[in-house]
Amino acid sequence: MAVTMKLKYIDELSGGRKRFRRRWPKDVAEVRGETFFQKPLKARSGPAMVTEWEALSAEFEAIVAAHRRSLEERESMSPRALWQEAQQEARRLLEGAHGGDEVVRQVLAEDIAQSQGDPMLYRAVIQPDAAPPAYTLADAFNLYEREKIDESQGRGPRNRLARVRKKTEKALPPRKSPLFEVSLFSRSMVERW
């Protein structure tokens, strides 16, 4: 008596070949520009195929997790940090380009606009010398964390800062508001007391 097992996400191709094919989640598919993660399997049956299937499933999950982690990191970044990241990306894209600087910038900007890319990257390509966004409360917290909290101190100070950050963001306007406005708000509160 034989036991058969059906593995999910396995397609049979012509000639008995098999492939792993799994649909990307919607948020990942939008960024990657493809609908499926697909790779041909070397093994056609048996334990080798199961091992290969497990490895490809783990690779798929790792890619999705990395994408979502990077999205969460980008959402927590301040506008100024996003601007600096966009400037670095624009320099990298323009690095190997040949031709007049303005012509290359225009072509690259049109490509970004047509593919509905990052507006911050578009601005960094078109206006590389533009003023960066104002500092925000998120920038202040990030600077404090870099400058004042040491790895040797353990997790306590980092956890305390996270609690203060969470309470401050809950009490004050959105994280993306400029630090100058926040400091005026807090100064007026102090003057009233």
Image (cartoon, grey):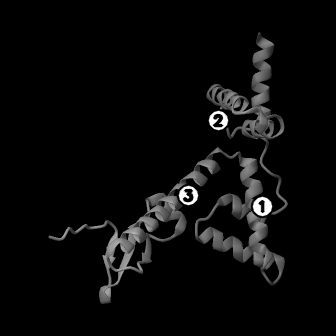
Q: Which residue is mark 1?
A: 87
Q: Quadrant of residue 159?
A: top right
Can you see residue 175?
A: yes
The amino acid type of the residue labelled 1 equals Gln
Q: Which mark is residue 174?
A: 2
Kindly give the residue lying farthest to the front in the view shown: 1
Q: Please determine whether, in this image, residue 70 is positioned above or below residue 183.
A: below
**What residue appears at the point 54 percent right and 53 percent down from the top-left corner?**
68
Kindly give the residue lying farthest to the bottom in the view shown: 15
Image quarter hosting the C terminus? top right
Name the spot of residue 123 as percent of width and height, x first: 73, 61
Q: Which residue is mark 3?
A: 67
Q: Which badge, 1 or 3, comes first in the chain's sequence?
A: 3
Depth check, mark 3 against mark 2: the one in front is 3
Label 1 element class: helix
Label 2 element class: loop
